[in-house]
Each structure stands twice: as structure tokens, then as C-alpha cells.
Image: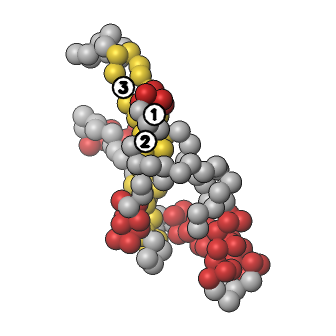
């Protein structure tokens, strides 16, 4: 679950300059550490922690090498990584050079269907402390809380 709080700010520019607007801001996002990933894979496979750690280190090295050569990388059911290099618009063809026209390369991750579905299934909640105090203690989704150390997986 990702829990949000409501924040406000005064817009400094545009048609709504000076207007106070409100938006949802994530409180904190739980993080699965590298150790947690390794422990989970060890539980689900016959691999040792050392084997998993070595495989992840090797995967990182292979991906870095491929990206440094300008290649895209297919990561099976996870998705794929590829480089994009945005270009500035120039007035003449002669001005289009690596130094002048090409921007810093960016890495784009394109998830596969299962990963998209997992992201779309995350439960979202907006914490409304004032509304909770005024009502009988309900919340938007009936969240159960949980600290950063909790590992739901």
C-alpha cells in the first residue's frame, strides 16, 4: 500500500498564479532491500544466498556492459532496458553534432504485462487526519498501517 498525505502550495506562475492548490504526496514508500530480495529468492529456490548475490552482481555487470555499448537488454518477465538519447533542434544540418545536439543518454525501463499489472494493483490511500478525528475513526481504505521494517513479501 502507498499512503499519501494532502499538501498545499501557492502557484508562482501561470493562469492560477497566487492560487493555493492541493495535491497528494506519498508519506513514505516501503523499500525492499537487496538483502530482502536475496532472502526471498533463497526461500523460493534451491539457490544459496551466495549464489543469488553472485547472480545479481553478474546481472548488474552484464546490463552495464550492454548499455555502455548502446544495446537494449531484455530481462525476461520483468521487462527491458534501453537507452534513449534526446536531440536538440538545430537550425542547420551542420549544427547537428554530438557536442551541440545530443543530450545526456537516459535509461528507459519498459515493464512486461505482469509487472504492469502488479503496479496497477497496488492499494492507494489518502490519509485525512482531520476527517478521521471528526468521524468514527474510519479511513479511505481501512489501512492497517505498518512500518518501514515490515516485509509484506
Q: CA distance from mark 3 to mark 2?
A: 19 Å
- Residue at position x 36%, y 66% in the image: 117
Q: Residue at x 41, y 22 (%)?
A: 8
Q: Is residue 142 above or below residue 59?
A: above
Q: Secondary structure at mark 2?
A: loop
Q: Answer yes or no: do the residues labelled 1 and 2 have beta carbons within 8 Å?
A: yes
- Which residue carries the number 3 mark? 22
Decide if residue 150 is in sight here. Answer: yes
> Disc 1 and disc 3: Cα gap in Å?
19 Å
Residue that badge 2 annotates: 139
Marked residue nearer the N-terminal end (3 or 2): 3
Separation (CA) of disc 1 from disc 2: 6 Å
How crowded is the residue under tag 2: few (<14 C-alpha within 10 Å), some, or many (20+)?
some
Does 7 appear above or below 19?
A: below
Q: Which residue is mark 1?
A: 132
Q: Quadrant of the C terminus?
A: bottom right
Q: Position of residue 133 (x, y in %)?
A: 48, 29
Crowd rating for badge 3 (residues with CA inside 10 Å; few <14, some 14–19, many 20+):
few
User: Relative to 8, does residue 123 appear above or below in the rendering?
Assistant: below
Amino acid at each position: 500500500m502507498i499512503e499519501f498525505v494532502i499538501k498545499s502550495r501557492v502557484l508562482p506562475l501561470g493562469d492560477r498564479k497566487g492560487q493555493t492548490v492541493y495535491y497528494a504526496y506519498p508519506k513514505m514508500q516501503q523499500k525492499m532491500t537487496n538483502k530482502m530480495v536475496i532472502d526471498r529468492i533463497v526461500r523460493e529456490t534451491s539457490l544459496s544466498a551466495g549464489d543469488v548475490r553472485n547472480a545479481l552482481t553478474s546481472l548488474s555487470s552484464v546490463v552495464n556492459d550492454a548499455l555502455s555499448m548502446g544495446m537494449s537488454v531484455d530481462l525476461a518477465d520483468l521487462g527491458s532496458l534501453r537507452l534513449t538519447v534526446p536531440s536538440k533542434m538545430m537550425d542547420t544540418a551542420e549544427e547537428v553534432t554530438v557536442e551541440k545536439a545530443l543530450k545526456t543518454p537516459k535509461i528507459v525501463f519498459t515493464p512486461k504485462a505482469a509487472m504492469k499489472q502488479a503496479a496497477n494493483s497496488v492499494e492507494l490511500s489518502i490519509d485525512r487526519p482531520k476527517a478521521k478525528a471528526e468521524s468514527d475513526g474510519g479511513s479511505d481504505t481501512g489501512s492497517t498501517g505498518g512500518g518501514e521494517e515490515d516485509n509484506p513479501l
